[in-house]
Image (tube, rainbow, N blue to C red):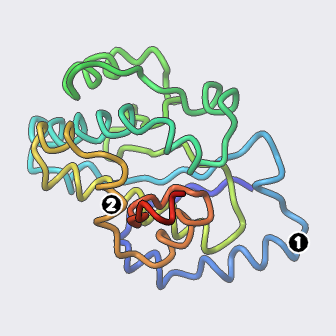
Amino acid sequence: MEIVTHPMSLDYHKNFCWEDIMRKAISLGYRSHQTSTCGLHIHVNRSCFGDNREEQDEVISRILFFVETHWAELLRFSRRSEYSMNRWAARYGYEKTGREILDKAKKGNNGRYAAVNLMNYATIEFRMFRGTLKYNTLIAAIELVNEICDLAIHLTDDGIAKMSWSEFVGTIEAPELITYLKERRLYVNENISAEEDL
């Protein structure tokens, strides 16, 4: 079973009947994570990034830069293999600026099979996540997308470029996302004293 979300607020997703849908799918024998053919695709309205295409492109370029900069962590988060990611959600490739990545993305060489698909008119689509029928994993992925989008909206190009993964996870307060990051060993913002390190 492949899940494709429609654009809705994080609160709406959390109050939506996802648990019921997943429970029913499991009871009917559907699989998601245990296949090689489906993913979890999260759509975000372009309109939340600005009033016009130029403003939206500014934010989208920062999203793309974040994804390329933190590709290793996002690959681990995604639960996909590198092969699967290259097949269904390929990266555009790192460049010095988000604008350069966006220019490359607009050429459309990946078609819709990009980690962040820009081919839809009204939405951008995060395609990097492996499919799931676990509610907590679904919500963690949606919370991650929400965090990345918020970051891209509120930070400058320079702010995004300077942000490390540990600084990023240090800003997160979403409980499902924190739990999932810890499970995937991606929650690295806890200080380790020199004595503990020995």
Image quadrant holding the N terminus, namely bottom right
Image quadrant holding the C terminus, namely bottom right
- For the point 76% across and 54% down, which residue is it? 33
Dot 2 amino acid type: Glu
Give the quadrant of residue 128: top right
Tag 1: Cα neighbours inside 10 Å, few (<14), some, or many (≥20)?
A: few
Q: Nearer the viewer, residue 32 or 163?
A: 163
Drawn side of residue 125 relative to residue 21, left or right: left
Q: Position of residue 148 (x, y in %)?
A: 32, 53
- For the point 69% across and 36% down, which residue is it? 81
Q: Tally the numbered discs.
A: 2
Dot 1 amino acid type: Leu
Tag 2: Cα neighbours inside 10 Å, few (<14), some, or many (≥20)?
A: some
Q: Position of residue 79 (x, y in %)?
A: 66, 48
Tag 1 residue: 28
Drawn side of residue 44 relative to residue 184, left or right: left
Drawn side of residue 60 relative to residue 111, left or right: left
Give the quadrant of residue 104: top left
Q: Which mark is residue 147?
A: 2
- For the point 42% across and 60% down, which residue is it? 194
Q: Position of residue 99 (x, y in %)?
A: 19, 25
176 up-or-down from 2: above or below: below
Query: Are the two marked residues, 1 and 2, in contact with CB atoms closer than 8 angstroms?
Result: no
Which label lies toward us, 1 or 2? Answer: 2
Q: Position of residue 17 (x, y in %)?
A: 58, 82
Indicate the secondary structure of the residue bearing disc 1: loop
- For the point 47% across and 61% down, which residue is it? 187
